[in-house]
Image (cartoon, rainbow, N blue to C red):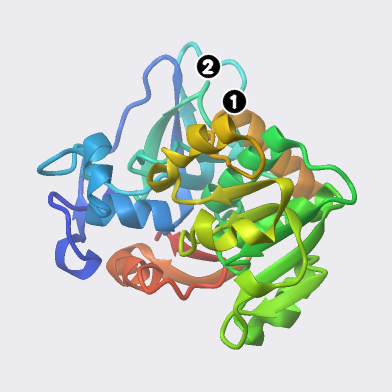
Amino acid sequence: MKAAVRTIYGPPKEVVTIKEIDKPTPKDIEVLIKVYAASANRTDYHVLTGKPNFMRLLTGLSKPRLIVIGSDFAGQVEAIGSAVTTLKPGDKVMGFAGALGFGTLTEYIAFPESKGIVLMPRNTTYEQAAACLEGTFYAAAGLNELKPTAGQKALVYGATGAIGSAHVQLLKYYSVYVTAVCGGENAELVRALGADKVIDYKTQDFTKDDEQYDYVIDAIGKSTFAKCKRLLKKKGMYLPSNGFENIFLVPLTRLLGGKRVLFNAPKDIKGNLGFIKKLIEEGRFRPLIDRTYPLDKTAEAFTYVGTGQKIGNVIIKMN
């Protein structure tokens, strides 16, 4: 089978190739999935390039431990292990393995039944399902833990990315007032997702906004707590997407009280994917797809992701 592989860290076009590797055989607790689509996302880009450098503490210091890239997938169950009870051949499924990857940019994967895998929503294609995973999971996992309440206010910086666009929609699910920060050319797009107010970062400094918020969400990791602190209410929370860089501010701001930096390691992948599936089937969430690439253009896809200009998700479609 074909797979997108790399053996060293580096820029996508320099290190990613498409190679033939062995098709896996599922273990007793695994399902064999024919992958139809996956996302080329920002987390995978960091794992691929090995930057920022602290990523290598988890993925391999001198070279990557996992040569096949990719962390999410949408596909069809082809075979099951002898101990599998909840899935059967022919089931359409979607899944996410977490930030460190699982080698999903390939034509087949063997995936544990008990991990982050659920049946696909009935009303989606494989490409749409793949666009509901990595970014949407991170948004859902954080908000489901916070449980925002109706009438609260949130500002989302980077509202057109995979994580940011998911935050806008999920916050509206909780009936939160949302200010979206994005390029002015995308104002109508984020309003269609539910944003109540739009700030064009190209012409305005969003940190000088005259409103105060219960939550300020930096969905792209390009701001800081210090810059956003004035936007927060007395007990407001700053949610960064670059949690490792803010890790020391989490306990410090909790100790001091008042305005806080909040970062919890995302958990319960299966449960949050089930929540996302429910919202899609109810028509309360729609993924954004910027571009779709074939598997043999994976390097080009990640090069585009690395520009930081994508709107929503970039999808890799298998042959």
Is 292 placed left or right of 175 in the picture? left
User: Taking the image as drawn, is residue 4 in sight?
Assistant: no
Q: Position of residue 203 (x, y in %)?
A: 60, 88
Vertical placement of 277 versus 165: above or below? above
Q: Residue at x 60, y 65 (%)?
A: 157
Residue sitting at x 32%, y 27%: 25
Residue 110: percent from the left, percent from the top?
Answer: 39, 31
> Which mark, residue 213?
none
* Mark 2 neighbour class, 10 Å CA radius: few under 14, some 14 to 19, many 20 or more: some
**At x 80% / y 65%, what residue is drawn?**
194
Numbered mark located on residue 87 in the image:
1
Disc 1 crowd, CA 10 A, few/some/many (<14, 14-19, 20+): some
Q: Are marks 1 and 2 in contact (CB under 8 Å)?
A: yes
Q: Which structural element holds mark 1?
A: loop
Q: Is residue 304 above or below residue 281?
A: below
Residue 150: horizontal and vertical position, in percent? 89, 47
237 and 301: which is toward the camera: 237
* Viewer can see residue 84: yes
Residue 245 placement, left or right of 275: left
Q: In which quadrant of the rendered image does the C terminus lie?
A: bottom left
Residue with the most extreme top position: 83
The residue pinned by badge 2 equals: 84
